[in-house]
Image (cartoon, helix red, strand yellow):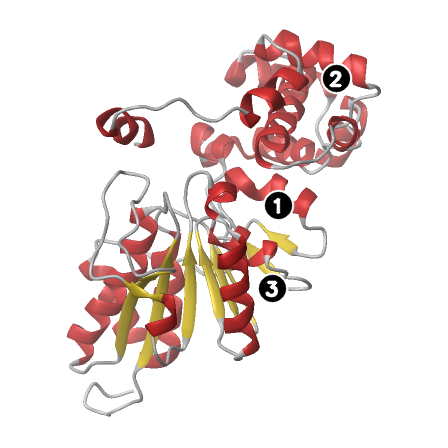
Amino acid sequence: MKATEPIRKSRFAFLTLTNYSMIAVSNAVEPLRMANTLSGQIAYEWVLASLDGAPVPASNGLALSPTVPLADIGRVDVVFVCGGNNVREAVSPALLTALRRIADQRVPLGGLCTGGYALARAGLLDRYRATIHWENLSALREEFPRVLISDQLFTIDRNRFTCSGGVAPLDLMLHLIEIRLGSAISQRVSEQFIVDRIRGDTERQYVPLRAQLGISHQSLIKVAELMEANIERPLSLERIARATGLSRRQIERLFKRHLNCVPKRYYLEMRLKRARELLLQTAMPIMDITTACGFQSPPHFSKCYRNQFGHPPSAERHARARPPAAIDPAASAEAAR
């Protein structure tokens, strides 16, 4: 598409929830601004919104303005729900009603970072493929079984646009820019932001172990990913060895050399970490979490959990239910970094 060829403007609304991720919102808005500059036309417009129009504090303690009431956003092509920390507490009945009303008007919906959680709570991701920040993947899978959760950087399924947090919204917007303005403009946008390559929707989002070990340890990463994919019904080391083409002894040496632990311990800690996510992020009964994380019985689960975290699962759940203690804004901003 030629830069001088006029096109209909795309207009996006970014609905900010309390404690939203500012880096995710910035990485969504800035590519649109740059696309306008490089294309020589106003191809994109955007508006920041909240339910009542008041600026909403982000997880870093700052707030963006101007912010308008959601009811006053006018015509938009997509409403992106922008989430971040403690997204469960940010989702209110009023928000769910507003999102369902928007969906009834046939307006496409999206989610940045944990914003997809709000869409799932509203029932607006049922039978859709969707992406959310990797820390929330397992909780969303358990709580919303009708949502087809993906660990991709971003997912576009019909009129739903969801992505992970951090810089993943940049990848989503570059993809949308390429569709509307062509690959030359999207490439120039990426160059302006010192992005060495444009990542597609088939790429997986950040995986901690891969980031820790690097690409030179694919055998170990493959074993760990196989463990992660079989949390509810843990595999024996012999089955893992057969599936990966390694011997049991090779796997044990890899874990000892690079992670300083035995495979059995690593697998157990992975399952306990998943259990802790479910305790903190969902209302699932502890019995169901016991089963979902591959433990034989609640007493066995409780014992392993106490050994790992210093307290039983019930104490973790009760601690989450208590209201947070008041802290000053400076301490809150420091903790959110």
Residue 304 falls left or right of residue 309: right
Residue 326 position within the rendered picture, expressed as x and y whole percent measured from the top left: 35, 24
Give the labeled residue for mark 2: 301
Label 1, label 2: how far apart the Cα atoms are = 21 Å
The answer to whether residue 141 is above or below residue 122 is: above
| The N terminus sits in image quarter | bottom left
In the rendered image of this protein, does residue 140 appear above or below residue 284?
A: below
Looking at the image, is mark 1 or mark 2 earlier in the sequence?
Answer: 1
Label 1–label 2 contact, CB within 8 A = no
User: In which quadrant of the rendered view does residue 276 lie?
Assistant: top right
- Left or right: 310 as drawn, with respect to 45: right
User: Which label belongs to residue 140?
Assistant: 1
Mark 1: which secondary structure? helix
Res. 160 in view = yes
Q: Which mark is residue 124?
A: 3
Q: Secondary structure at mark 2?
A: helix
Residue type indicated by callout 3:
Leu
